Amino acid sequence: MYSYDMLYDATYGLVLLGIVFSLLASAYVKLTFKRFSKTMATSGLTGSQAAEKILRSQGIYDVGVAWVSGNLTDHYNPETKMVNLSDSVHSSSTVAAIAVAAHECGHAIQHAKGYAPLNFRTALYPAANFGSKASWILVMLGIVFNVPGAGMLIDLGILCFVLALLFQIVTLPVEFNASSRALQILKTSDILPDTEMKKARKVLVAAALTYVASVAVALLQLLRLLVLRGGRRRG
């Protein structure tokens, strides 16, 4: 029979370790952004102005730049074709703000050029979004109701979780590529000199760590689900 003690098997510590790593990565990106938010860009461009310049330099005229509330809530919306920049980026003339704005423009450029991983991630989003919400519900139902067929609920929950994990894995090359495009354009367009480019790179590398941490946590969670499923089969 299934035992709830299995909820505290050895992999529980690994999951906690992954969560700690994720929290540290999040704190690091915030500290790095704050650090280089004190460095004013010699170009004098704000994040929104830099974004406009980058987009136009790539021949992209159907993408707008807008303000969005929040802190580090910057994102590119492919449906509305808008680069949305947060409070600390949109009207700020710092190296950190320009780096983040350039990164979001990198996504707009990916969209304009039909970058395959981005297209795949966009197509995968509905299933992954459903999977992330339904996975643990199905797993817990399968655990609580120890009846014939309950194992199928756990299996279905694991499958849903895999969809969400796949989305996060595909996100990695999308984010790395956007940062690579951003740094290349910042350099060739002379928006940032070499000394400021090094600082912009540090901001984007720090941001990338949060995505790596998310994948690491998800992988450990998947391992835990598999262990729980295996324990139920033996019970």
Image (tube, rainbow, N blue to C red):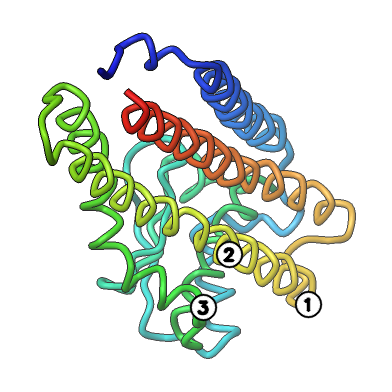
- Closer to the camera, 115 or 136? 136
Instruction: Give above or below for 162 relative to 20.
Output: below
Amino acid type of the residue that numbered disc 3 sits on in the rendered structure: Gln
Q: Secondary structure at mark 1?
A: helix
Local crowd at mark 2 within 10 Å, few (<14), some, or many (≥20)?
Answer: many
**Residue 20: assigned label:** none
Instruction: Give above or below for 137 relative to 75.
Output: above
Name the N-terminal-most of marks 2 and 3: 2
Q: Nearer the viewer, mark 2 or mark 3?
A: 3
- Determine the image quadrant of residue 138: top left
Task: Name the image quarter holding the C terminus.
Answer: top left
- Closer to the camera, 174 or 16? 16
Task: State the CA–CA distance, disc 1 to disc 3.
Answer: 18 Å
Q: Is residue 170 left or right of residue 206?
A: left
Q: Which residue is mark 3?
A: 110
Task: State the CA–CA distance, disc 2 to disc 3.
Answer: 17 Å
Which residue is depicted at the point 26% across and 53% down? Answer: 129
Q: Position of residue 29 (x, y in %)?
A: 63, 34
Task: Name the image quarter holding the N terminus.
Answer: top left
Q: Which residue is mark 1?
A: 188
Instruction: Give above or below for 9 relative to 161.
Output: above
Name the N-terminal-most of marks 1 and 3: 3
Instruction: Give above or below for 167 relative to 97.
Output: below
- Determine the image quadrant of residue 139: top left
Q: Position of residue 188 (x, y in %)?
A: 78, 77
Q: Which residue is mark 2?
A: 50
Local crowd at mark 3 within 10 Å, few (<14), some, or many (≥20)?
Answer: many
Amino acid type of the residue that numbered disc 2 sits on in the rendered structure: Ala
Q: Secondary structure at mark 2?
A: helix
Which residue is depicted at the point 62% across and 31% down? Answer: 25
Q: Secondary structure at mark 3?
A: helix
